[in-house]
Amino acid sequence: MSEKVHGGKWFNENNDYKIMDEALLEFNYSAREKFLKGIKEHNPDGTKGLARMKSSDLRQCIREEIIDAWFYLAELERRAK
């Protein structure tokens, strides 16, 4: 098992599992809450929703989300310079 220094502390691969577990727990909680919020905002009466969207509309929504993510990343990188 290799060890690495990060921030003055020693880490090994076992820590990667802890990082993964914590990240997945946070994602599961955050993703569920965000999705439920979206349902309340966009489909409160159950007449709309992902299952009823046309594939072309889903594709466009993904494009828009990717564009947003690109600009969020660009701003983080700008701040890191």
Image: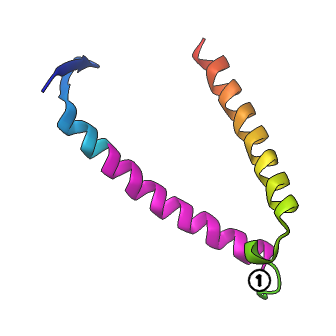
Quarter of the image where the C terminus is located: top right
- Whether residue 21 sits left or right of residue 26 in the image: it is left
Residue positioned 22% across, 37% down in the render: 15
Q: Position of residue 3 (x, y in %)?
A: 16, 21
Figure colour scheme: rainbow
Q: Could you say where residue 17 lies in the image, as x and y percent from the top left?
A: 26, 44
User: Amino acid under label 1?
Assistant: Pro
Q: Residue at x 82, y 71 (%)?
A: 53
Q: Quadrant of residue 41?
A: bottom right
Residue 17 located left or right of residue 80 = left
Q: Is residue 43 above or below residue 16?
A: below
Give the vertical position of 8 relative to 30 (above or below).
Answer: above
* 47 to the left or right of 36: right
The boundaries of the magenta stretch are: 20-44
**Residue occupied by mark 1:** 44
Write the residue at 72% across / 77% down: 40
Residue 69, image x, y percentages: 70, 39
Q: Is residue 30 magenta?
A: yes
Residue 6 sits inside the magenta stretch: no
> Looking at the image, which residue is at 54% across and 67% down?
32
